Image (tube, coloured by chain):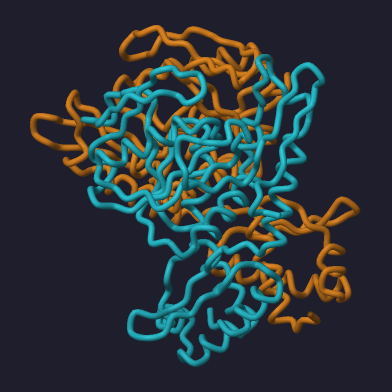
Chain colours: A cyan, B orange
Amino acid sequence: MKMRRSERIVAITKILVDKPYRLFSLNHFAEKFNVAKSTVSEDLAIIKRVFAAENMGKIETLSGAAGGVRFIPDKADYDIKKTIKYFCQQLSDAERILPGGFLYMTDLIFSPELIMEVGKIFATKFADLDVDYIITIETKGIPIALATARAMNLPVISVRKDNRVTEGSVVSINYVTGSSKKIETMSLSRRALQVGSKVIIIDDFMKAGGTAKGMLDLMKEFQTEVLDIGVLMETSEPENKLVSDYTSLITLERVDEKNQEVVARPSDWVI
Amino acid sequence: MKMRRSERIVAITKILVDKPYRLFSLNHFAEKFNVAKSTVSEDLAIIKRVFAAENMGKIETLSGAAGGVRFIPDKADYDIKKTIKYFCQQLSDAERILPGGFLYMTDLIFSPELIMEVGKIFATKFADLDVDYIITIETKGIPIALATARAMNLPVISVRKDNRVTEGSVVSINYVTGSSKKIETMSLSRRALQVGSKVIIIDDFMKAGGTAKGMLDLMKEFQTEVLDIGVLMETSEPENKLVSDYTSLITLERVDEKNQEVVARPSDWVI
């Protein structure tokens, strides 16, 4: 159908938002809606203004032959704080305490709406990096990695804790979990990752950092550069982790089984 | 800012699309944009018309006191076929054949953009069901379940193949894998699921249906009603599966290791 401006910008908004980071040429829209490129530019100016005013992410126009327009789902600072505070509030519930002082958080990690917002936070933090893949390790890292990858338009690679026939030939390494000092194995299909790639590691939880350290070692086997590590939650103890460069959103101060108390707060950079 | 119509409908489109199935009252938008409800109705009529004309999903307005407007990411038939055919085409690549006649598909399942479309297909198929949770089993079911749940605004529950302390007390069952006749264990945290819930099971692959059968048995332990089972890919052999009611998107006819040939086709209902 031949559209009016108000109709066209509905369609363009939907197309851009559906595929974050995907670059669309102005010609693409000019042809699709049978209008001049200058008309598309005017449409985009309106969308851009609204997204900026309403903190809905960024509409970025790149000029030149390889140019076009794309949606970057950046979250504003206040919105990042709001999401993380909400998450902390949900976590700080004595009902979540499990025997042994563990904290039940599976339900939150598997809430698509909440975890999509967490993914946008990591995407905002890592927006300036030139990344090829998001790497995670099963199981609870997967939703967070998918949400981050969705917001950055990247593929996810999931490292396994076992070794399945459906992965083909794999590279396995043994690693020592930082806190319980157990020896575990992680493996990744040889074909999963191109040698020389740049990756970000995403995981749900870091205590001593043994798993993250293992993943760094595994990435070395693939001659892969790890640009950053994002974890949803770290524990404040031990203070010195086995890896030094990482970004956490939440810091778990304590889970007090006896007094039935959980203290989870936004990590320092969030405040 | 006080917005003009063309600006307002950009913002409303973004808000609706960001949260599929979430019901927003007309008052919500009237207050947010400081306009009359009748003006919001006119805005929504434009958005609705464009979404219908461009097959971008459905804008549904519900009247009455509990009424409002919501975005339902239904995929049109032609679009469902297109996505499934694309998936089949990607799968039918001899490079994907692994020793033992297995097929490598992890990269496709972990491609957020592609798997979001698969999720929308399941959401379209199951749109009329009154569902509380999407249930899956680690690992490769998770991305598909998350994408489906995201499109339906539901939480995901992931059944584990091991038994972790961070899940609290669990219900475990043993099940026999349908094809290799191995005894495996699956477990689910007691607190994951409310007794009496209605669920849809989503998984990546079904051969004989042993895993799906196991999940049905596990759901019985939680007195949960399974409304349907969605699997991304089933094998054509064995024809009789251990479960009878399920919906697959792709049927794998054969993986011929010797002649290096893969035949994957859209399942019968898709054509």
At a point 74% along the width and 74% down the height, the residue shown is B43
Image-quadrant location for residue B70? bottom right
Name the one closer to the observer, A208 or A191: A208
Name of the residue lying farthest toward the front: A240
Name of the residue lying farthest toward the right: B65
Classify residue B103 as left or right of residue A151.
left
- Disc count in the image? 0
At a point 49% along the width and 92% down the height, the residue shown is A38
Q: Position of residue B241 (x, y in %)?
A: 40, 18
At a point 43% along the width and 17% down the height, the residue shown is A182
Image-quadrant location for residue B45? bottom right
At a point 46% along the width and 89% down the height, the residue shown is A37
Name of the residue lying farthest toward the left: B259
The relative height of residue B222 versus residue A35 in the rendered view (above or below) is: above
Q: Position of residue A244 (x, y in %)?
A: 47, 44
Q: Position of residue B185 (x, y in %)?
A: 47, 11
The relative height of residue A146 versus residue B194 in the rendered view (above or below) is: below
Q: Position of residue A46 (x, y in %)?
A: 63, 83
The relative height of residue A248 versus residue B193 in the rendered view (above or below) is: below
The quarter of the rendered structure image containing the C terminus of chain A is: bottom right
Classify residue A262 as left or right of residue A121.
right
Name the one closer to the observer, A94 or B175: A94
Image-quadrant location for residue B110? top left
Classify residue A52 as left or right of residue A2.
right
